[in-house]
Structures are given as C-alpha cells and as structure tokens.
Image (cartoon, helix red, strand yellow):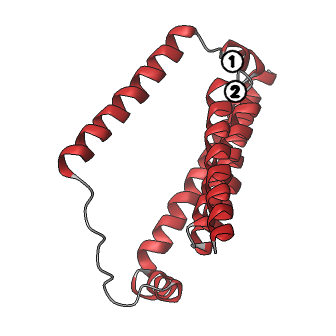
Amino acid sequence: MIVYRYIAETLFYAFMILTFMGGFMAVRSRDLMHAVLGLAVSLLGVAGLYFHLGSPFLTMMQILIYVGAVCIIIVLGVMLGNTPDQLAKMNLKGRNMVLAVGACAAAFLTLFATLSVTGFAPAAEQIGDMSIRFVGQSLLFQYCLAFELISVILLTAIIGAIILARDGREETAK
C-alpha cells in the first residue's frame, strides 16, 4: 500500500516537472518552433496530471484539443502569416524576461494573499447526472443550434485565415 503511494507521488512530481520544463522551454526559446514544442510538452504534462487525478476523458481532450489542434494551428498560423524576416526579428530581451517574472510573481502573491484570507471553498455538490454521455446528448440535442453556430464560426475563421495567408503570399511573390 505504501509503495503505491510513493509511485503515485513520483508520477505526480514527474508530470509536474514535465509541465514546468515544457513551459520554461516555451518561454525561453528563441526559435518559434522550439517554443511550440515546449508548449506541447507542457500541455502533455498537464494531460498527465489529469490522468493521474483519475480523469481519462479530460486527458484525451487535453491531448486532442490543446496538444493536437492548438499547437498545429499556431505552427500553421506562423508559417502562413510571417515571413522569415519577421521571424528573425523576434528575439527576447532581458527587460521582457524581467517583466514576465515580475508579472508572474505579482500574480502568485495576489493568489496567495487571496487564498490566505478567504481560504479554499468547499467542493460543489454534483447536480444530477453529469456523465460524458449526458454532456454529449446535451450538445447534440438540447444545444444543437449553438453547437452548429460555433462550428460555422470556426470554419469561417479557418477559411478567412487561408484567404489572408494566400493574399499575403501573392503580394510577396509579385
């Protein structure tokens, strides 16, 4: 029994370190592709934490949506939108790093002060059946119109991005 506890703690710390190291790589990397790779590693660490907490559905959604879709969209957006000259101009200066560390420290201190004064809220009670099946049926039956509208908006955004990227490529080719 004690061995399982140590294994669970070791897994938690491994996923935590993976998340922080990926985030550090994403922030400190000068190459944009390495930064996106660091973001993907960090998001995979968060997925591992979700799995460790006993939520395989959230784990798969994290991997599919954030690691898969968001990182690929960032890469495609950068590759379609920016020229190599614009990418070369992106460099980190020491002042930006100091501002980022200061902002993170201020956010941490604010969070710590708020939690020390108010304390943690008790866990909310579950209202009814909130299974994955219920959420899926709600999306496809009760909220079908909203679900379809979001799909159309996302499709419009993707088509618009492709048109803008194509126009930019044609202008630079002339």
Looking at the picture, does residue 154 appear above or below residue 77?
below
Q: How crowded is mark 2: few (under 14 residues within 10 Å), some or many (20 or more)?
A: some
Looking at the picture, does residue 151 appear above or below residue 35?
below
Expressed as whole percent of the image width and height from the top left, the position of residue 60 reads 65, 68
User: Which labelled disc corresponds to residue 161?
Assistant: none
Q: Can residue 101 be seen in this view?
A: yes
Amino acid tagged 1: Gln
**Quarter of the image where one finds residue 3:** bottom right
Amino acid tagged 2: Asn
Q: Can residue 166 be seen in this view?
A: no
Q: Which of 160 and 33 is in front in this view?
A: 33
Q: What's the residue at 31%, 40% (across, down)? A: 111
Expressed as whole percent of the image width and height from the top left, the position of residue 149 reads 46, 68
Q: What's the residue at 29%, 79% (across, down)? A: 125
Q: What's the residue at 50%, 9% (across, down)? A: 95
**Are discs 1 and 2 less than 8 Å apart at CB?**
yes
Horizontal placement of 69 versus 102: left or right?
Answer: right
Q: Is mark 2 on a helix, strand or loop?
A: loop
User: Which labelled disc corresponds to residue 86?
Assistant: 1
Looking at the picture, does residue 161 appear above or below residue 167?
below
Expressed as whole percent of the image width and height from the top left, the position of residue 173 reads 81, 23
Q: How far apart are marks 1 and 2 (CA)?
A: 6 Å
User: Which labelled disc corresponds to residue 82?
Assistant: 2
Q: Nearer the viewer, residue 60 or 102?
A: 102
Looking at the picture, does residue 122 appear above or below residue 165?
below
**Quarter of the image where one finds residue 92:** top right
Horizontal placement of 126 versus 24: left or right?
Answer: left
Q: What's the residue at 34%, 90% (across, down)? A: 128
Horizontal placement of 130 versus 169: left or right?
Answer: left
Q: Residue furthest front?
A: 2
Q: How crowded is mark 1: few (under 14 residues within 10 Å), some or many (20 or more)?
A: few
